Image (cartoon, grey):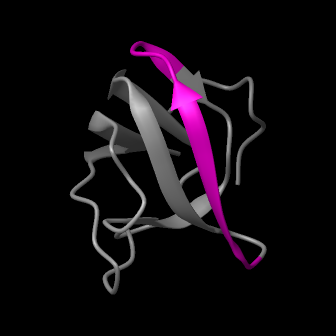
Amino acid sequence: MSNVGDPFKWAEVVTPDDLVNLSQPARGLWIGGSGAVSVEMYGGGTVIFSGIPAGTLLPVQVTRVNFTGTSASLIVAGR
């Protein structure tokens, strides 16, 4: 994966799902609508990031954005 500070070379709109992974692991999430995001981390484990304001670039490496626990909207994954 690229360094966190590098521009994204790939992106996809995220539809949160409890079973289906992203088409590629992401190294960041753009959060367009405020809320919480539940993710499966690239290195393993599930975590919920709460209170994320709209317009936040969340620098986390993830394989999936879960439906359960996610209230944020307009999420885009980038790598």
Q: Is residue 71 visible?
A: yes
The residue drawn where x is 34% and y is 70% is 23
Q: Report the side of 71 relative to 50 (left or right).
A: left
Residue 51 lies in the magenta stretch: yes
Q: Majority secondary structure of the magenta segment?
A: strand
Picture layout, residue 12 above or below residue 56: below
- Residue at the location (53% across, 54% down)? 26
Q: Is residue 59 magenta?
A: no
Q: Quadrant of the N terminus?
A: bottom right
Where residue 17 sits, quadrant-wise, is bottom left
Q: Residue at x 68, y 26 (%)?
A: 6
Quadrant location of residue 48? bottom right
Q: Position of residue 14 (x, y in %)?
A: 27, 51
- Residue 59 horizontal/vertical position (percent): 67, 35
Above or below 31: residue 21: below
Residue at (41% x, 32% y) in the render: 35
Side of 3 where 33 appears, left or right: left
Q: Is residue 45 left or right of residue 76?
A: right
Residue 25, image x and y in percent?
Answer: 53, 64
Residue stretch rendered in magenta on the structure: 44-56
Q: Is residue 10 visible?
A: no
Q: In the figure, is residue 28 to the left or right of 18?
A: right
Looking at the image, is 57 positioned above or below residue 8? Answer: above
Q: Nearer the viewer, residue 63 or 9?
A: 63
Q: Who is closer to the viewer here, 53 or 74?
A: 53
